[in-house]
Amino acid sequence: MAATIEESLLKKPVQYLAGVGPKRAAALRRLEIRTLGDLLLHFPRTWEDRRPPQAQAGPQRRVEPALPDRSRVPQENLFTFPKTTLCAKVLQTRILPLKNRLQILRALLEYGETEIESVWFKRLSPRYDVFRSLRRQLQPGKLLWLVGRMERASRNRSILQVEEQYPAEDPEAVRIHVNRIVPIHPLSQGISAVRMRRWIRTALDAAKNDLPEPLPRSLIQKHRWLPYAEVLEQFHFPDSFADLENARNRLVYEELLLLEIALAKKREQIKEKQKQHRYEIRKHLLTPFKEGLGFEFTHSQKRAIREIFEDLRRPTPMGRLLQGDVGSGKTAVAAAAILLAVENGYQAALMAPTEILAEQHAATLKQIFRNLPVRTVLLTSGIPGAEKQKNLELLKSELAQVAVGTHAILESGVEIPKLAFAVIDEQHRFGVRQRALLRHKGHLPDILVMTATPIPRTLALALYGDLEVSTLTELPPGRLPIQTQHTGAQKAYQFLRAQVKRGRQGFIVYPLVEESDRLELKAAVEEAKKLQRDVFPDLKVELIHGQMPAQKKEAIMRKVTSGAADLLIATSIIEVGIDIPNATVMIIHHADRFGLATLHQLRGRIGRGPHPSTCFLITEGSLTESAQKRIEALCANHDGFKIGELDLNLRGPGEILGTAQHGMPELKLAGFQDAPWILKAREDAHQLLQRDPALAAPEHNTIRKTLAQRYRHTWSAIDLS
């Protein structure tokens, strides 16, 4: 909500702030910072405790902003060795040359009753003295604040590798950069951390008397929030960790309240619309479909189908989320709903986030509908032009009843005249905007979205507030649990070879397509060659990844499905949609580089047939605490809902709520671990809209303007005027 600060001072271009100018303003634009208001909302990604050790209540800490409970595990990219901050007197300095045109400046410091050696490294320049300004600061007798990493050297003397230094008499340094809890902001090339802190400090000082209050007084009093100006102050430059946590809680709550109000408005407006199509359960397709499945629906599948059919028969367009664990039978439920639309003379669409998943869905539906008069066509950017044109004509002429594809379905040239029902698979890869675009493909088609990343129902209602929720809680009978082990590659390869001898198949997954020197990770392309040559020369090995042409991927998957390949080496492209009942082994290299939900999805590619299955997690080197917890969680748990709950506590801020939800506004702070605030924001949004449905009250003015600004163009169908 704070993003609508409208006072002229806060809309002032950032280039006019002291020390910025046009060149640095261009660098700030890469961070979406154009005004002073944007600068105030450029939140820290973490904080460092730069108080001297004796001033701290405990060991130096580094705090992750999205995790107020610091017993939880922060994002891996926030793990660093703790830094040391101290104020010391300079005794003497000297400069030493190193190889590769490097120079080192060493300074002997007096710190209390001990001596510390500090070092700075710089590359030699032929034009100027690289240490000139630094030597002026390092005059013997001078007091300096130093920030760096401490190492133990010989003769028990400590060496401080200095990253920042400030004269002790500099009041700005003590106020902003040292002797306090210091913010670490996201940066771009050409912008240093020191400059960013200084600019934000200046902006806070200039705007503190001009910041409008985003929240209505009733909610401020209810939750006992501090004034907004103080909240921003304590979030950027906190006086204590408790003050930081309180400030963060309020900013998270504001983000979520805005989201919940918008979702509620969206849901209300959809419910007000009347769809033109109507359904009757005729059963001339549904009955033979059910009889031909070869299995009975589970109780939760029957319940979900009943809930979906009841929605479909209502006069307002359906919006429903179907969530369930890997292999719980979501596709069969969706197929039943597709057939209800088709037997009533309408068309249906199924949209998936990747070509390989769309291709798998198309193959699955063709198999399910093989004895029914239902034609399914595929629409992805990778299919040949002639085939794509033929499929477009079949849809336009209504000779094809079902379209399966990727985002290509949303293209303006795709005409589905009688589109009445649409399915979106892997909901977290899309979002509200895609649902709005789909609704414009037909006349308000009913929409079912599916996800295999289940979360608690109350949380699902809060996060997908424009959708009803159906949950599959059972796996089909006879499904065997998958054994999961954290082990070495050789043991995994031996097990795989033994399984292939018994007629089974397996997968080996790598996180990259090509080798990466920077990340030092094994990559699928090179490893496939090595494994075929050195480890499995007698096996039929295939490779698949997202950069391949669609036709090649289809050909490879046909080989694997038919049993013509023993082993498929892949990237995480096979995370969803691959259904090979004969596959019993999954080997995941660099498993610590994958998120918990992705690991669970990859594991779900095996264990889909009658044979016992095993997943091997392979890592190299030492693991971060976060990675260790993910590995342990996967080895100990098979229940997707339990995995989902654990995943909530391990995710970084905004991963699901933010950029991954295409079409949703980016949430800078809130994450799944903020479940209590999500639910509070949902409750408050509901009560606020009950009292003031049009948000017409003066105290709701900022909320109304913010909604209009952030959502009108994003969600297209939403009316917030």
Image: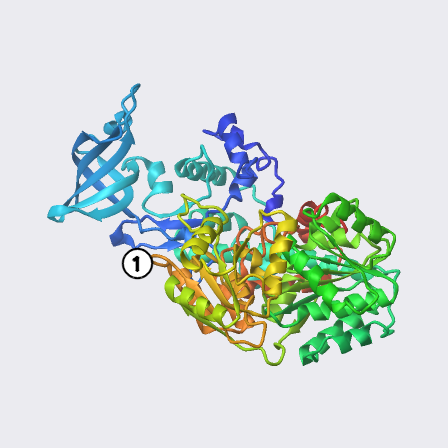
What residue sits 52% from the left and 28% below the top? 16
User: How would you rate the neighbour count of disc 1 (Cα within 10 Å): few for under 14, some for 14-19, many for 20 or more?
Assistant: few
Residue 235 picture location, percent across and down = 46, 50
What residue sits 72% from the left and 71% below the top? 333
- Which of the 4 image quarters holds residue 490? bottom left
Q: Residue farthest to the top?
A: 127
Q: Is residue 376 above or below residue 175?
A: below
Residue 110 appears left or right of 244 = left
Residue 228 picture location, percent across and down = 54, 50
Q: Is residue 263 visible?
A: yes
Residue 499 picture location, percent across and down = 48, 70
Q: Is residue 88 above or below residue 301?
A: above
Q: Residue farthest to the front?
A: 538
Amino acid type at mark 1: Ala
Kindly identify which residue carries mark 1.
57
Q: Is residue 28 above or below residue 181?
A: above
Residue 464 appears left or right of 36 = right
Residue nearest the viewer, comparing 348 with 225? 348
Q: Is residue 216 visible?
A: no
Say what secondary structure mark 1 lies in. Answer: loop
Residue nearest the viewer, comparing 418 with 653? 418
Residue nearest the viewer, comparing 710 with 283? 283
Residue nearest the viewer, comparing 68 with 585? 585
